[in-house]
């Protein structure tokens, strides 16, 4: 059996690192909570934890969507809550390497191909065969480069090194 691919993820709009107990973690804001996904050293998803933001943050953001999270005051409160949680975990920032997964509650996970490159042989929306062949070439290049899609409430197109190339 071939080894499962490990996907590197570097911090961006979320934090990535290692806990004092060796677990890898990605954590950040997924309204209305701070959420952390924990992985073992082999990249297997082992658990997920969500913490509702503080009452002070809730007074600013609201308690129902749409949340009002675009203020310096809200950012400072969430940043303090995230840092306190990181202290509890003995967190050190690092690139993490995880196996493919997709969470059933939060829009978080890994996809090999973005939607526009999946099923290009059978899709019916192409104008002509030439356009289909261009998409097939794009898909093959994507796969050869080791790119992937990281979902953290939205899609991030990632390089093989775990750097965000576009959102």
Image: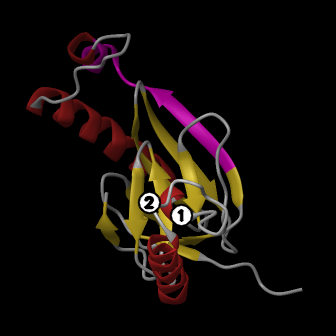
Query: Which sits earlier in the primary sequence, circle 2 or circle 1?
Result: 1
The segment highlighted magenta reads 47-58
Residue ranking furthest to the right: 1
Q: Residue at x 67, y 57 (%)?
A: 101
Tell me if mark 1 has few (under 14), some (14-19) or many (20+) residues whose alpha carbon lies within 10 angstroms of its own.
Answer: some
Rendered location of residue 140, percent (x, y) = 54, 83
Residue 98 in percent (x, y) is at: 61, 69
Confirm or deny contact between disc 2 and disc 1 (CB under 8 A).
yes
Q: Residue at x 49, y 39 (%)?
A: 35
- Residue visible at 32% across and 46% down in the picture: 83
Is residue 18 visible in the rendered structure shown here?
A: no
Give the label on residue 91, or none: 2
The quadrant of the image that shows the N terminus is bottom right
In-image side of 135 versus 21 (left or right):
left
The image shows a total of numbered marks equal to 2
The residue singled out by tag 1 in the image is: 20
């Amino acid at each position: 059996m071939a080894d499962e691919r490990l996907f590197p993820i570097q911090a961006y709009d979320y934090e990535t690192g290692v806990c004092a107990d060796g677990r890898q973690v990605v954590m950040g804001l997924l309204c209305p909570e701070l959420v952390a996904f924990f992985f073992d050293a082999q990249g297997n998803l082992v658990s997920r934890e969500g913490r509702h933001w503080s009452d002070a943050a809730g007074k600013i953001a609201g308690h129902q969507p749409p949340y009002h999270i675009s203020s310096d005051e809200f950012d400072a409160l969430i940043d303090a809550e995230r840092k306190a949680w990181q202290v509890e975990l003995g967190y050190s920032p690092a690139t993490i390497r995880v196996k493919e997964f997709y969470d059933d509650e939060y829009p978080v996970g890994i996809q090999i191909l973005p939607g526009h490159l999946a099923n290009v042989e059978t899709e019916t929306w192409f104008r002509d065969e030439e356009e289909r062949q261009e998409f097939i070439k794009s898909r093959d290049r994507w796969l050869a480069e080791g790119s992937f899609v990281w979902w953290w409430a939205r899609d991030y197109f990632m390089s093989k090194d775990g750097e965000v190339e576009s959102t």
